[in-house]
Amino acid sequence: MRIGSLLDDRMRKRFVHCHQMAQVLRCGKHRGKSFEEAAQDRGYCSWIFREQGLSKTLQKFRDYLVKEHAGIVTVGKHKQKFFKEVEAEDPGYCEWVKNLAEPTFFETFQTYLQGYAEEPPAKKQKTEGITDKCKVCFDRPIGCCFVPCGHLATCLRCGLKCDRLSGECPICKEEIALVTQTFPA
Ligand SMILES: [Zn+2]
Ligand SMILES: [Zn+2]
């Protein structure tokens, strides 16, 4: 499960270095623009979050968006705003989304919002094996990978929380440069 152990220290450093340098889109309609500029095109960002088969360069852009903005709202009055923006602008709305019994289109947003609540609700017990469970909340399936250490240890919610709160991997304590969302095959 440990991808990072395949890379020696020097390679890992280079990897992080490349990541920090590569803040310009190298393909797609915003080619040549910085990640920051491209993030202003919210329709494009929505597509980035939705699309499953992104190229490596665009995946980097998605990683950037996840790190900076967590996600994008796809429906309702705050459509095409980033999660963090809605959180800052309209706490009442967030409260409403957080408590929706059937979030449907708001599911990712709700997951994000609940991730910062004190007590994560322990619902949705699926039948995955114990090894696929998040090592932090022991509830949701593993959904992200830390770069550069490569640990697949937490759900996306807890991964983002670790990044925000301590900035280090809960398993090996290595500094988190990036949290990458992972998808089960
Ligand atoms: Zn978790
Ligand atoms: Zn680690």
Image (spheres, rainbow, N blue to C red):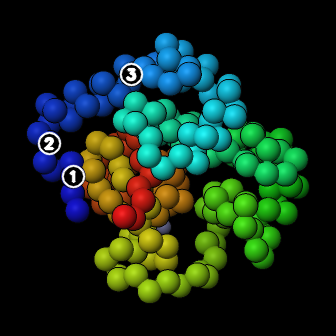
What residue is disc 2 on?
7
Does residue 46 appear anywhere in the picture? yes
Q: Which residue is mark 3?
A: 22
Count the numbered circles shown.
Answer: 3
Identity, as a three-letter code, of the amino acid under mark 2? Leu
Task: Locate the C terminus by quadrant.
Answer: bottom left
Q: Tell me the residue at 29%/56% (across/down).
A: 151
Mark 2: few/some/many CA within 10 Å (<14, 14-19, 20+): some
Q: Secondary structure at mark 2?
A: loop
Q: Position of residue 64 (x, y in %)?
A: 50, 35
Earlier along the polypeptide chain: callout 3 or callout 1?
Answer: 1
Residue at the (76%, 74%) spot, across then down: 102
Question: Spatial distance from mark 1 to mark 2, Cα to Cα?
Answer: 8 Å
Q: Position of residue 139 (x, y in %)?
A: 49, 77
Does 17 sit above or below residue 130?
Answer: above
Amino acid carrying mark 3 in the image: Ala
- Nearer the camera: disc 2 or disc 3: 3
- What secondary structure is marked by label 1? loop
Q: Foreground residue, 173 or 183? A: 183
The kind of secondary structure element at disc 3 is: loop
User: Are circles 1 and 2 on residues that touch, CB within 8 Å?
Assistant: yes
